[in-house]
Every structure is written in structure tokens, then in C-alpha cells.
Image (cartoon, rainbow, N blue to C red):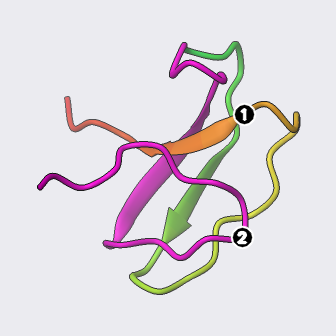
Amino acid sequence: MGQSNLFHPGSKAPNNGVYVEVGENGDPVVNPKSAHLHRGDRFPETTNDARHWRRKRKP
């Protein structure tokens, strides 16, 4: 089974990396909040209750 792509505020980060805020269906957000987290750190609150966190893709 694969790993989940969307994470809720307060849950633990599965891997080190930069995570960005996305919309409720995984849609992009204008001026998204981002956070650099280490494995086991908790996700911060989002600016809107309907948003989630997703790991930022490498260019």
C-alpha cells in the first residue's frame, strides 16, 4: 500500500521535507503557506479548516 499524500494539521510528518498548503481536493492555493518539517514533527494549523498539507514536489 502507498503512503497518503494529504496530511491534516496536528498529524506527524512521515518524512523530512517542505510541505505546502493545498485545497480540500488537493487543488493549488494562491499564496500557500509552507513549512519545513523533520520526520515526527507535527503539522501546523492551516489558514482555512478545509485545507490540508502536501509534500512539495522537487522541480
Residue 45 lies, in percent from the top left, at 82, 57
Instruction: Looking at the picture, tell me which residue is in the foreground, 42 or 50.
Output: 50
Would residue 1 appear left or right of 23 to someone viewing this image? left
Residue 5 lies, in percent from the top left, at 36, 44
The residue lying at 24 percent from left, 55 percent from top is 3
Would residue 51 appear left or right of 7 to someone viewing this image? right
What residue span does the magenta drawing correspond to?
1-27
Residue 22 shown in magenta: yes
Judged by its main secondary structure, the magenta piece is loop
Displayed quadrant of residue 20: top right
Determine whether 3 is above or below 58 in the image. Answer: below
Displayed quadrant of residue 10: bottom right
- The single residue placed furthest to the front in the displayed view is 1
| Quadrant where the image shows the N terminus | bottom left
- Amino acid under label 1? Arg
Determine whether 48 is above or below 44 in the image. Answer: above
Determine whether 53 is above or below 39 in the image. Answer: above
- Amino acid under label 2? Gly
Which residue does the numbered mark 1 point to in the structure image? 51
Which residue does the numbered mark 2 point to in the structure image? 10
Would residue 24 appear left or right of 41 to someone viewing this image? right
